[in-house]
Image (spheres, rainbow, N blue to C red):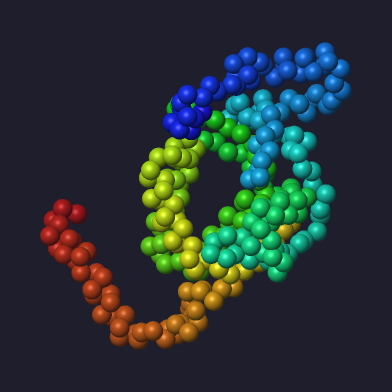
């Protein structure tokens, strides 16, 4: 609605579901009246499915402690073993699965079909609405959760400390503005420029393990990996500096705090 209001205010928006204000029970009664035969018990849940996941709302999500039952989720668990996958990223975008090239959309669909059989990706989200109230909804989103986790692991190996920090801050801000329908806000284009630039070298492969109701990212490989043994290994000898260099570094790093506590020594 907001996009039309801004870009095409002359267009009349038709929203019959909103304007008629029908309850779910009224809708069910109407369908029964017209002869539709369906599992009305399951229709108690509002299920909205899209490329990036499925939301499941019902009486349990209207309060803080309700649990959505297993049968309410569209996908049921039919896999009991362990499955390993390798996801390939190119400049931040998922582009291959187990070495097979595919578009990001194809990969998302394939990953959803594969992981949903394990019951992976189920959770309950609690968020703040634009009008100030809190909302609660269950969801099933195996592909996004796996991809986000795998992508973040690759970023942790490739981006610098400051890049990771600021990308996290701006990503959360971007998501909040998007959730509040502010996609047309000019600052969104500024944030997108930064986010796109951070992905220049986010290329590599991530190994993922799937189990019933659980997944784990096992590791990654990339030519841009900053965790390079050529510069030293964690817990072992460091090849970039000596022990004496550490003494000097410690003195320089401690200097601001030494000044502060010297001045405030009587205030402790």
Q: Quadrant of residue 62?
A: top right
Measuring from the top left, give residue 164's x and y in whole percent.
43, 60
Q: Is residue 138 above or below residue 18?
A: below
Residue 232 in percent (x, y) is at 46, 82
Query: Is residue 135 depicted above or below 210 in this figure?
Result: above
Q: Is residue 111 placed above or below 154 in the rendered structure?
A: above
Residue 60, compared with residue 82, is above or below; it is: above
- Name the residue located 41 percent from the left edge and 56 percent from the top edge: 194
Nearer-the-camera pick, 195 or 128:
195
Q: Which quarter of the figure has residue 206?
A: bottom right
Q: Which image quadrant is residue 165 in?
A: bottom left
Identify the residue shown where x is 80% and y is 18%: 31
**Towards the viewer: 154 or 9:** 9
Spot occupied by residue 238 in the image (x, y as percentages of width and height): 42, 83
The answer to whether any part of residue 170 appears in the image is no
Q: Going by the image, does 185 lie left or right of 233?
A: left
Q: Quadrant of the C terminus?
A: bottom left
Is residue 136 visible in this depiction of the protein?
A: yes
Q: Nearer the viewer, residue 37 or 156?
A: 37
- What residue is shown at x 59% (from left), y 73% (from top)? 221
Q: In percent of the image, x 77 and y 14: which residue is there?
A: 30
Query: Which residue is more in the foreground, 267 or 181?
Result: 181
Q: Is residue 35 left or right of residue 73?
A: right
Q: Position of residue 179 (x, y in %)?
A: 49, 37
Q: Is residue 167 left or right of residue 40?
A: left
Question: Which residue is outermost to the front?
Answer: 10
Q: How many marks?
A: 0
């Amino acid at each position: 609605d907001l996009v039309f209001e801004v870009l095409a205010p002359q267009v009349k928006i038709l929203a019959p579901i909103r304007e008629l204000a029908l309850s779910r029970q009224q809708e069910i009664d109407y369908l029964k009246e017209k002869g539709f035969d369906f599992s009305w018990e399951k229709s108690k849940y509002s299920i909205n499915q899209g490329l990036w996941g499925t939301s499941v709302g019902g009486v349990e999500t209207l309060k803080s402690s309700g649990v959505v039952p297993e049968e309410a989720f569209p996908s049921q668990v039919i896999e009991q073993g362990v499955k390993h996958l390798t996801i390939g990223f190119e400049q931040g975008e998922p582009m291959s699965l187990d070495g097979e090239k595919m578009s990001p959309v194809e990969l998302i669909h394939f990953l959803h079909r594969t992981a949903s059989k394990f019951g992976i990706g189920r959770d309950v989200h609690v968020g703040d609405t634009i009008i100030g109230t809190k909302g609660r909804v269950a969801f099933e989103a195996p592909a996004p959760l796996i991809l986000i986790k795998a992508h973040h692991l690759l970023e942790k190996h490739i981006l610098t400390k400051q890049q990771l920090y600021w990308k996290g801050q701006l990503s959360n801000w971007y998501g909040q503005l998007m959730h509040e329908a502010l996609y047309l806000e000019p600052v969104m284009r500024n944030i997108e420029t930064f986010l796109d630039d951070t992905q220049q070298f986010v290329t590599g492969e991530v190994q993922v393990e799937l189990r019933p109701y659980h997944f784990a990212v096992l590791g990654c490989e990339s030519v841009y990996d900053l965790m390079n043994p050529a510069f030293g290994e964690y817990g072992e000898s460091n090849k970039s500096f000596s022990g004496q260099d550490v003494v000097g570094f410690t003195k320089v790093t401690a200097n601001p705090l030494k000044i502060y506590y010297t001045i405030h020594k009587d205030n402790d």
